[in-house]
Image: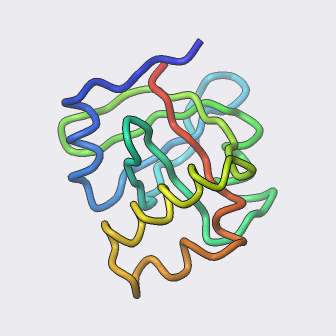
Amino acid sequence: MTGRWSAAELRLIAAARELRIAVRRADGGLRPWLPIWVVRAGDRVYVRSWHRRDTGWFGQALRSQRARIRVPGLDTDVTIEDVGGASPDVNADVNDAYRAKYGPGGAASMVTDAAVATTLRLDPE
């Protein structure tokens, strides 16, 4: 069972330009911290890669399904769920969140079909 974000946590995440993520290794240790863009859509938190791949942070996140994230005022463990095949409504909401937060030019690479297929939902542990 996944947890739910509090209203305060959602505000902190939404206010952050990006979050830092450290994917968990099989032994529970953390991989190096990486900055990635993050959006809030409703009461959910999402991240994407501009293209799906089995290597790098994205491939590690798919395998581990666990990470630690940081934004100013929040440092917490999360579970990761691959929702790249989510409903069209979820995809549209996440696309809209990227456009609203990063602007049409900045979000352009994050709302392509390839990027939509990389959508990961982060839930607090």
Front-lying residue, 70 or 89: 89
Relative to residue 110, is residue 58 drawn left or right?
right
Residue 115 position, x and y percent, is 65, 68
Residue at screen point 51% across, 53% down:
47
- In depth, the one of 90 and 71 nearer the eye is 90
Q: Which residue is at the far front?
A: 89
Give above or below for 40 relative to 118.
above
- Residue drawn at the location 75% of the way across and 50% of the way down: 85
Q: Residue furthest top?
A: 1
Question: Which residue corresponds to the image point at 46% horizontal and 49% vertical from the top-left?
Answer: 33
Residue 98, position as x, y percentages in the image: 42, 66
Disc tally is: 0
Query: Eyeballing the image, is 14 above or below 81?
Result: below
Up-down relation of residue 31 to residue 105 (above or below): above
Q: Is residue 88 left or right of residue 78?
A: right
The way the protein has been coloured in the rendering is rainbow
Q: Position of residue 32 (x, y in %)?
A: 52, 48
Quarter holding residue 50: bottom right
User: What is the residue that sits farthest to the right in this orientation?
Assistant: 54
Q: Quadrant of residue 100?
A: bottom left
Q: In which quadrant will I find the N terminus?
A: top right
